Amino acid sequence: MLVPFSWLKDYVEIDVSAEELQNKLFSCGFEVEELTYLGKDVTGVVVGLITETKKHPDADRLTVCTVDCGAHGIKQICTAATNVFVGAKVPCALDGATVLHEGGIQKIKSGKLRGELSEGMFCSGEELGINNDFYEGAEVYGILILGDEAKVGEDIRPVVGIDDYLFDIAVTANRPDCQSIFGMAREVAAVLKKPLKQPDTSYTPVKTDVVVPVHVHESTLCPRYIGHYVKDVKIGKAPQWMRRRLALCGIRGISDIVDITNFVLLELGQPMHAFDRNFLRGGEINVRRAKKGEKIVTLDKKEFTLTEENLLICDGVSGVALAGVMGGLDSEIKDTTTEVFFEAAKFARDSVRKTSRSLGQRSDSSSRFEKGLDAFTPEFAMNRALHLTEKLGCGVPTSYRTDVNAADMTPKTIVTTCEKINSLLGITVPKEEIVSILTRLFFKVEEKGDTLTVTVPLWRDDVDGYPDLAEEVIRMYGYEHITPTFLSAASVTHGGLNEAQKCELKVKRTLQHEGFMEACNYSFYSPKDFDLLRLSADAPERKAIKILNPIGEDLSVMRTILAPSMIANVVRNVRRGNESGRLFELANVYLADALPLVDMPKEKQHLVLGMWGEGDFFDLKGALTALEEAFDFTFSYERGEKSFLHPGISATLKCGEKEVGWIGELHPEVANALALEKKVYLAELDLELLKKKFAKDISYHNLPRFPEVERDLAVVVDEKVTCAEMEACILRAVKAVKKAELFDVYRGKQLGESKKSMAFRLTFACDEKAEKPLSPEDVDKFFNKIVGNLKHNLGAELR
Amino acid sequence: MEQDTQKIVEEAEAEAAKAADSRALYEVKMKFLGRAGKVTALLKGMREVAAELRPAFGKKVNELRETLEAKFAALEEKLKKKEMAAKLSGEQIDVTMPGRRRAQGTLHPVTRVKNELIDIFAGMGFEVFEGPEIETDYYNFTALNTPADHPARDMQDTFYLGEKFLLRTQTSAGQIRVMENKKPPIKILCPGKVFRSDDDATHSPMFHQMEGLVVDKHITLCDLQGMLDEFARTMFSQSSKTRLRPSYFPFTEPSVEVDVSCASCGGKGCSLCKGTGWIEVLGAGMVNRRVLENCGIDPDKYTGFAFGMGIERIAMLKYGINNIKLLTENDVRFLEQFKD
């Protein structure tokens, strides 16, 4: 919110610099996001009086002027402007001055123009950064001609109203009462410990017989509505001082009556509206919900079709204003307006927000209502507007006022103690200090011993308990008084991660050791990602939860499978020239029982692995083996069918009987569609299912008394026989074989069509109770038994 | 005899001196001390010596052998040393060549910071609780003293999934779930993903927060600052300080913004802290009475504080990451910079 320093000074005698005030506001809860000195780019420009003009001897279009710059001396300035004359007071940029020029800053230097000395430059309004609202005449073509009141030699900035600071203040959502200059002035007065001057709200009403009945049909949406009739209106221009203030806050002057409503909005934070009474059909006001399909054209000539959700201000026939958002076109103030009906109301913040959002129509008024205004200010604002109308002489306030008030106007009281306030803060703020601070902030405080009975100002809807008072006290007393302690009175608790969280970290650490880097992706992606995976129409993954208001289609559904994000990561890396890599991500997928959502969806933790550029299926499988080892469980791999995986190089992962995931090479067709020339290997696991198996108990096994014996076995089998089948058969054959590890697979013509040779390293160990080591004969016996079984069960021939 | 032994010694010394390596030396040694060596030959000639002279003769020959053996041993050691030195110098490797290892992976910077934060607070007795990412309107807003028409709802742009369901906009939602099920003393951390409908150069629609909550008897604002001071010292630098300034959150009262003294300039003011000497790091405050009431905790008996911080923000400050988008691009050249 923009607050001009000069305007604040109307209500508080400020004896600190703008920078100091900025710091004080910061420490009491108002961050000044930007402090601007309006005249910072206009330096060295003074008021000059043109005492003589003559034609330039060498240039038809130039005039040579003699200018009296007071203390700065008599200067000669050449100008191309045609509106200068002897006796005119003009802004003179002297040698070394800076002015604005085409969005930048221009430095003025003394020099010769076609042989004639020019010791500066005359300025237009634009070069001073002002318009007519700042200074009448600023928008004329040519040089700004100043009024007689300007003193020769004086700095131009105070003359044209730019010797001022503009505070851009961030007001937190709990302080709608500070969305105005006067609201901020209350805080400034409190923080500087200065008295606050109230704006003048006096006026003399003139009797009238006119009535403008107001019927509020929705008192929850409109708790208070004040209307006041003003007669004998003569529309004109608002005075310079008022327009300048509006201009400082970025609002252009329109006409005196409209400017008054805008002025009051800025000054007191109360949105107001002025209706041309002659355009109120039936001469009455109805505050009601719009009918479905009802239309209104607002001041900015936009037409809206409304619903019952929109609160509408109507005359006897139809809508004349969108409550709290914007007035209607028909009843707006025109040059010919002679009678005005002022409105100052409180509309429910939710109602205004809904209307403003659903119609996409925002205004200074709606943004204030959305923050939640109090029910006290409408009356204050109405009186102020009437005072200004009288002061400006643009209308005559009558005696007719209607005030439909359903709001509770009894001030809140809080009974508390200094001890309670201090117990929350942890320090002891002296009682006198507490009372003084609250009083400065317009709370009424009655003391009785340590007990305080505090009456809350009507505009402070945000305060309703002693913690709020504690906050008021500490922000004024100063947070620097808080002395850090370390839970001096708290109980000892035991902290740390629970088992599941530790396991999650262990999964990450294990993969890190396997050379994988952790990725992080958004929890949502595009529904097109399912098409990329070539999932069938009824695939469960397609049952994804949709975001109703996504940033875009690309980020519109919640993930049901992590693979698409991983594929996208690989694609991005490859496109950026990262030839190889290993990534993993551990994140939730979101599974709904029914769509649209009825119950809380399930969030299941998934783990996805991606690998490209180096390694093959078995390298990726190795990472899963690392997890098996880390957590002491075993996956079984079964040939699986996934639409997005290579049909021959993919598997379903099971843990016990449960399917827990998949692994495989990205289908070459999918890879082609993504222009991926490298093979990509992916795996995805449901960690939720594995978490139950995460507990790893380490218990010591006795070391064997006698050394183990290793022997290699190579057999030729049919291509179809799997390693797992071979392993199982070997281990089943004799008890003494402890391990069977495949170390070589060979295919060659001499083996025959669809045959392969598989070589295993077998490890034999004798029984724990055995008295002597295994003899070569024992091992031969076992070996032969194994060979026999392999032959019998799997048709394997010893090589 | 005397002359014989002297002569043999001289002869042996002369020949040994000519031996270029330990092998040649060995041959020389054999020539004197071997089975067919000169010393052995002397011994063999003992039979011809008179019986009474034999002991003296034998002693002499033994002395001779000992002398020679000692001499050969000394020489051998010298030669072996020389040979070893020569051998080792031939085996010299280029020690600057790279070591052989499997490349380590990395944890995401957000995970690293999250782990570090958990370590800091776990040491102070905080448990870790992770609530759901899809929340109800009640847990994310209403129970946190942000009813439907509350202007604070505008502070965050919420992704809605239905009438009642949304993507949590703050990990504060987890506070409620904990307080509903656990009675004071409570000390918890709620780390996790949060979502806001914001996507520009400095905002991501998904980021991570870490919420902390303490509820117990006699908890004060001083305790909040004490704990955050400790956090800042561990996370940033031993000389870090915190500064509280008033702010607003619906679920705390009083509410504060917490700035940490800029670790890069030590508070003098630099480009990182925009000349202020302070960096805004987190929001905090004393838990609002209504929030405690909503969870069935008696606010007259217990007080508490809560704080919440953006993990990405801390990671960016800590590692000097200048673009939030890098954190979700998953470019391996970025990720590999976060090796342990």
Image (cartoon, rainbow, N blue to C red):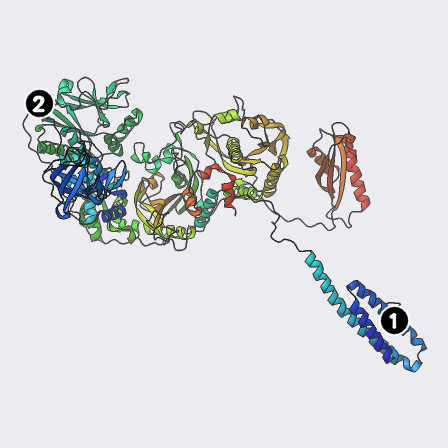
Residue reaching furthest bottom? B52
Q: Nearer the viewer, residue A714 or A106?
A: A106
Give the secondary structure at mark 1: helix
Q: Nearer the viewer, residue A221 or A757?
A: A757
* Chain identifier of the residue bearing label 1 in the image: B
Residue reaching furthest front? A58
Looking at the rendered structure, whether the residues under marks 2 and 1 are on a common chain is answered as no
Tell me the kind of residue under disc 1.
Answer: Lys
Residue A726 quadrant: top right
Residue reaching furthest left? A207
Q: Which residue is mark 2?
A: A210
Q: Which residue is mark 1?
A: B38
Residue A413 quadrant: top left
In this rendering, the answer to whether B77 lies above or below A323 is below
Quadrant of the image containing the N terminus of chain A: top left
Tell me the kind of residue under disc 2.
Answer: Val
Name the side, left or right, on which A73 lies relative to B31: left
